[in-house]
Image (spheres, rainbow, N blue to C red):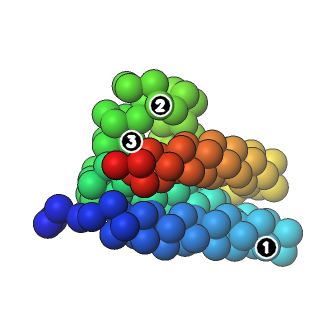
Amino acid sequence: MAELSAEEKITLSDLRAEKGREALSDAINNFNAGMYKTSVNRSYYAVLHSTRSLLILKGIDPSRHDGVKTMLGLHFIRTNLLPKEMIEIFKELTVLRTDVDYGDMEFIGKDEAEKALHRAKRFVEIAEGLRKEMIKELLKV
């Protein structure tokens, strides 16, 4: 990927953060409608897009979901920019999303979907706080 300007990074980050918020809204709506598998799927994508909104601010743009998770660990967890809990949420939701999307007999009940939704909300909230700090730093340069 060509080197992006600060403005380009911020624009992409904003778009990805909005995708994350939309996915979280979808997760809430699906949960409220009793569509727990779909809620889990959207909770996962809220976390994925929120992570991508952070990574692009560092000029990092993995093309695969595993790459996003790896880069989250390397650039945000190991450096203590985010709490270790964040990678655990990502891993947990990855497993759940894979089960509901690809498993033939997977059952997700209300309690498990609610836990996934709460974890996704927490992730998005923390990620957004850091994203705002990172944007302020980019604008100083």
Q: Secondary structure at mark 3?
A: helix
Q: Quadrant of residue 92?
A: top right
What residue does disc 2 label? Answer: 81
Give the number of the disc on residue 72: 3
Q: Are marks 3 and 2 in contact (CB under 8 Å)?
A: no
Mark 1, Cα crowd under 10 Å, few <14 / some 14-19 / many 20+, is: some
Q: Earlier in the sequence, mark 3 or mark 2?
A: 3
In the rendered image, is residue 1 in sight? yes
Could you say which is closer to the camera, residue 61 or residue 7?
Answer: 7
Location of residue 20 (image quadrant): bottom right
From the viewer's perspective, is 30 left or right of 38? right
Image position, residue 100 (x, y; %): 56, 62
Using the image, determine if residue 122 lies above or below residue 26.
above
Measure how far apart labels 2 and 1 are at the Cα level.
Answer: 31 Å
Label 3, label 2: how many angstroms apart (C-alpha)?
Answer: 10 Å
Report the number of discs.
Answer: 3
